[in-house]
Image (cartoon, grey):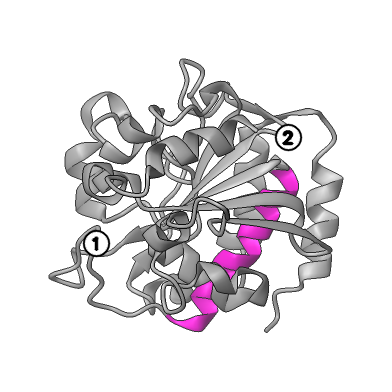
Amino acid sequence: MSFNIINLKVVCKRTKTLHKMKIKTLFETYTQLVTNKTNSETIFATSGMVNDYEKLDFGFFPLGSGILTDKSKIENATIEDDGTMVLGNDFGTITYVETKCSKDNREDSSKTITNLRNIGLDIKTTFFTNFYLGLRNDKLHKGTTNTKRIKPIEQDYKDLCFHFFLAQLELINPKTVVCLGADVGQTLSEFSPIFLNFSPKKNKISTLFADTSKQDFIIHTNDSTFDQRKFILIPHPSYAHINWNKYDIKNKIESVLKN
């Protein structure tokens, strides 16, 4: 793999000079490490994706700024160190953006965002992003939806997204990473054995909340790749009325986020 993680970290640390970082800086890094990467267009296309980004005034990164406050516009958005990163799977399809995000250029109708606002997150210090970059090309691959892929994703696309995820960790520098759903848990477990407990092949997410004497839905990292952080895996909030209705999941999430 030609994507060099050591060089990536050098770039990120050189870029990050302020306690409060401009999101515009993250987009500049995105252009350098993703869009300008050799064969990036092909890498996206062979996984049924298009490299679309920096389009919305309000929404998850990289389509939006990842800042969901009244200062969400990309030109003005900033984020401080030691806050929270919310890590989704991907933004969805081209059609989703065209039909659900066209009003005022905002992702306002998202159930995911609505339910995340109700678990005790400090929105002002939270960055909302996705592991997988770009949009699902449902125009080319008929039958593709926000929850169903027709074109399977390839390893080179996964690797590209993982390395940019590490860049986001370097630049945003969150203390806590809230991971949304089984797909994110599975992806992280594929890239590091640290996250093996997050794999749905090993544990259904809801069962991680079953034992009140444990917090198996939390993994603490402290290494050269992920640094010292707290990763929390939660059932996906888009179906919170179903996914959070047992084991007191919602209250447990709120309690952990306060600490």
Q: Nearer the viewer, residue 238 or 67?
A: 238
- In the rendered image, the quadrant that contains the N terminus is bottom right
Q: Which mark is residue 82?
A: 2
- Residue at position x 44%, y 71% from top? 203
Look at label 2 and name its amino acid. Answer: Asp
Q: Secondary structure at mark 2?
A: loop
Q: Nearer the viewer, residue 186 or 144?
A: 186
Q: Secondary structure at mark 1?
A: loop
The quarter of the displayed image where residue 175 is located: top right
Q: How far is the residue under mark 2 from the one under mark 1? A: 31 Å
Q: Is residue 164 magenta?
A: yes
> How would you rate the neighbour count of disc 2 (Cα within 10 Å): few for under 14, some for 14-19, many for 20 or more?
some
In this picture, residue 117 sits left or right of residue 147: right
Look at label 1 and name its amino acid. Answer: Thr
Q: Can you identify the residue that label 1 sits on?
A: 147
Where residue 209 appears, as percent x and y from the top left, is: 45, 54
What span is in magenta? 154-171
Q: Earlier in the sequence, mark 2 or mark 1?
A: 2
- Residue at position x 22%, y 76% from top? 150
Q: Nearer the viewer, residue 139 or 219?
A: 219
